[in-house]
Image: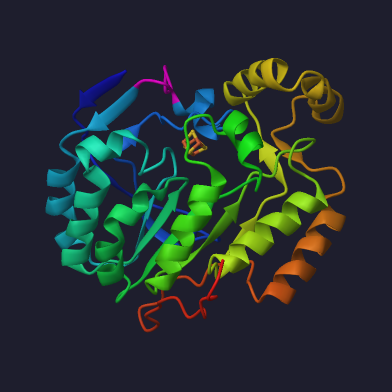
Amino acid sequence: MIKEITAKTILNHVKQPDPWFGLKYNMNLFRGCQHQCIYCDSRSDCYQIEDFSEIQVKINALDLLDDVLPRKKVRGTIGFGSMNDPYMPVEQEYRLTGKALEIISKNKFPVHILTKSDLVLRDIGLLKNISRVYAAVSFTITTADDELARKLETGAPLPSARFRAMLKLAEAGILTGVTMMPILPFLEDSEQNIYQIISRAQNSGATYIIPSFGVSLRPGSRDYYYQKLDQLFPGIKEKYINHYGDQYQCTVPGWRELNKVFQEEINRAGITARIPVFKPENRTGNTKQMPLFE
Ligand code: SF4
């Protein structure tokens, strides 16, 4: 179900220094997410989203952004995609993300987009403009296996579509890479999965892959995840319960070895584990040489 709502504010300050993406601000144009990943942290009770499958569209978001952005004194990176995907299917109809990028482009702010959708390609021209200041597009990819992703990330475009979109962005000179998070214990924590993600990211022009070997679970998100594990992967829930109990951070068993494999492989591939973040004096584009063939 889709519901239009009116928001009071749209651009939030990121209070703690953001170690991953260097964000100064973040923005959620929607509430709820149509991608319906079974492990999604945004379902946690602490966020007080009663029905995560109800999509709320902040219809006054663009007016708010147009008003507030020119008055911001600090030009820092604006992040899209912390609580939902800015390119979920409803964006086709509303084009809130695309129009917000127009406002950002006009005001010359840097931007970081986190998505699982190739719909981002619709805005490639805008992103190219913004990348004169700074633009980065990170695709969340937790498995290279489309069939597994179909079960885990029910409503999202498949990883193969994300890799193809990544290549197009890289070819357009836009900084792009992978957020390989979460790597789900007992489902995605094989060396083979890590090798495949790195290899396909390399062939798709990724500059960086940011890993997280584990998943965070808390009241709300844990209940939903366990219910889905029972339906889709019988026996795996019991492994989580035995291994982690009620722990928030569920780190992959043997993550050190897996991380070693990851580090060796990205070094070989010429990929970094950190995203080059915006610095006012350092205007970035994608510096990767594109392969001739995928
Ligand atoms: S795309 Fe992100 S926000 Fe949307 S359901 Fe998946 S994990 Fe949650």
Q: Residue furthest front?
A: 293
Quadrant of the rendered image containing residue 121: bottom left
- In percent of width and height, residue 88 lies at 37, 38
- In percent of width and height, residue 52 lies at 43, 22
Horizontal relation, residue 230 to residue 221: left or right: right
Q: Looking at the image, which residue is at 33% across and 41% down?
A: 28
- Work out whether residue 194 or residue 65 is closer to the camera in this orientation and state it: 194
Quadrant of the rendered image containing residue 215: top right
- In percent of width and height, residue 222 lies at 64, 24
In magenta stretch: residue 158: no
Quadrant of the rendered image containing residue 103: bottom left
Residue 161 sits above or below residue 201 on the image: above
Q: Residue furthest bottom?
A: 281
Image quadrant holding the C terminus, namely bottom right
Task: Give the main secondary structure of the magenta stretch.
Answer: loop
- Work out whether residue 43 or residue 98 is closer to the camera in this orientation and state it: 98
In magenta stretch: residue 52: yes
Horizontal relation, residue 237 to residue 6: left or right: right
- In percent of width and height, residue 192 lies at 79, 52
Residue 250 visible in the displayed image: yes
Q: Looking at the image, which residue is at 72% across and 48% down?
A: 213
Residue 218 sits above or below residue 250 on the image: above
Residue 182 sits above or below residue 56 on the image: below
**Which residue range is magenta in the image?**
48-54
Q: Looking at the image, which residue is at 17% across and 34% down?
A: 59
Residue 39 visible in the displayed image: no
Q: How is the image coloured?
A: rainbow
